[in-house]
Image: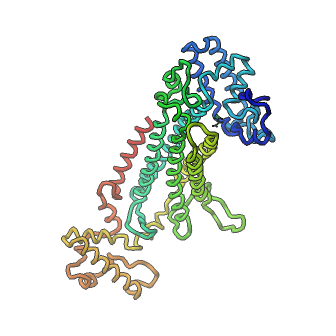
Amino acid sequence: MAALWSGRFEKDMDELVKKFNASIGFDQRLYNEDIDGSIAHVTMLANQGIVTEDERDEIIRGLEQIREEIGASLNSSGDYVEVPGMNGISPLFSYNDEDIHMAIESRLTDLIGDTGKKLHTARSRNDQVQVDCRLYLQRKIAEIAASLARFEEVILNKAEEYVDVLMPGFTHIQHAQPITVGFYFMAYFQMFKRDIERLRDCYDRMDYSPLGSCALAGTTFPIDRHETAAMLGFSGPTENAMDAVSDRDYMIEFLNAASISMMHISRWAEEFTWWNSSEFSFIDLDDSFCTGSSIMPQKKNPDIAELLRGKCGRVYGDLMALLTVMKGTPLAFNKDFQEDKERLFDAADTWQASIEIFANMIEQAAFREDVLNAQLNRGFLNATDVAEHLAQKGIPFREAHEIVGRMVRVCEEKLREGAEKESSGDQFGLEELTEEDLSKIDSRLSKKMLGDISIRACVEARKSFGGTAPDEVRRQIETGRKWLAEFMA
Ligand code: ARG
């Protein structure tokens, strides 16, 4: 079968080239958007008197029939039924169709005859593919944002469950200051909130219709681009036809949003991989998110957390691939752009699945309070609090810092000497220093002056806005819930 553009050609395409050139294998998933775009286009053509109302009705009937035919070729999970040797192409299509736009158009002409040939008046595949991709991506963004919103709800519930549970907070992977597990969860809440906001920004910026830009320079037909934009739910038409057919910024923005969000997932997956190890044992990952070893019978491996960390690299790859595809392309359309869709689909699918799986994994992970408690008296978690107490009693903070540093040194000496405790490797804490120890370190020091430096008291006192005190975290949770409710509304 000759291609739709075969008029100026004497020879048919080389068979290998045909396959290499075709995008039907992956752009067939744009079929719904392609048909929506065509229906809006032909409706506008009729309203402008460019085709007749009868022609419009015939074309729309044909397109709806094609929509049904393609829909029926999907299996229950929404994939095309595989046909041997067809590399996953729907049995309705062949490489001769090149892409979904030509496949639908040629099927339309098969179905309704010559009237079908009028559909492509005042448009080009260059604007058509952009309409399809924007519509597709906007739908995908809505789905991914909904998955992120559900994840946020999981995080809020976890934060509430663990709002009073203490744990060590780390810097440089070393014990730093005590925090609550609820506070820790709310840190991730903020990251995924920004991810949702980035998606919303990206959605709004792509919310313009390229339809009617045609090949690159618009058309001599009296089309109404505002009308098609409105019919398709866009907030208006794109301003410049040459930009509209050359622009892939919106895809790159989406891939950027996906990459940042996958980076968040990856950091958390990394933490949980460590925390699930016998060295930490802070958490228990649910069996349903772990795998066994084929040789070591005792193993329960955090494969899914690791795989999620790995998927982040894959999505970064998608972003880098498209940035690189675009960097040397002159205006306007170039066939290089066809490389955009697989990267876009891969990132969207990977990101969406990662969020959904990770949300379930987090929901079912349990923190081990016994282990966390045992960690609280290691690493002088209350050292900063002691310095703050001294500073509040009038010792300048820099001096207080110095004094607490000396206190830590004395504690470490005592631990080394095995004094007061059997040498079990346990911490000798600041709160264990005697009045005598204290006055030797600095004549102004006393137990009374140190105040209550138990870990719980330290955490409860960190009430500054954004701090870790349970009451402050309750406020963060409440603000988070309000934001989420407004987002979902
Ligand atoms: N299949 C192409 C794509 O994926 C359609 C764009 C138009 N192609 C062309 N040679 N003008 O981008």
> What percent of the width, then of the height, locates residue 453?
30, 70
Please state which of residues 254 and 171 is positioned toward the viewer in this rendering.
254
Please give the name of the residue rendered at 44% of the width and 70% of the height, measured from the top-left corner.
174
User: Is residue 393 at all visible to an observer of this figure?
Assistant: yes
Q: Which of the 4 image quarters holds residue 345? A: top right
The residue drawn where x is 34% and y is 70% is 382
The percent coordinates of residue 29 (x first, y second) are 65, 36
Task: Please count the marks in the image.
Answer: 0
Quarter that holds the N terminus: top right
Residue in the foreground of this view, choosing between 419 and 143: 143
Above-or-below relation of 469 to 2: below
Q: Residue at x 48, y 42 (%)?
A: 199
To which quarter of the image does residue 135 belong?
Answer: top right
Percent across and percent down for residue 267 are: 51, 58
The percent position of residue 294, horizontal first and vertical second, equals 72, 64
| 70 is higher (above) or lower (below) than 477 | above
Q: Is residue 84 above or below residue 405?
A: above
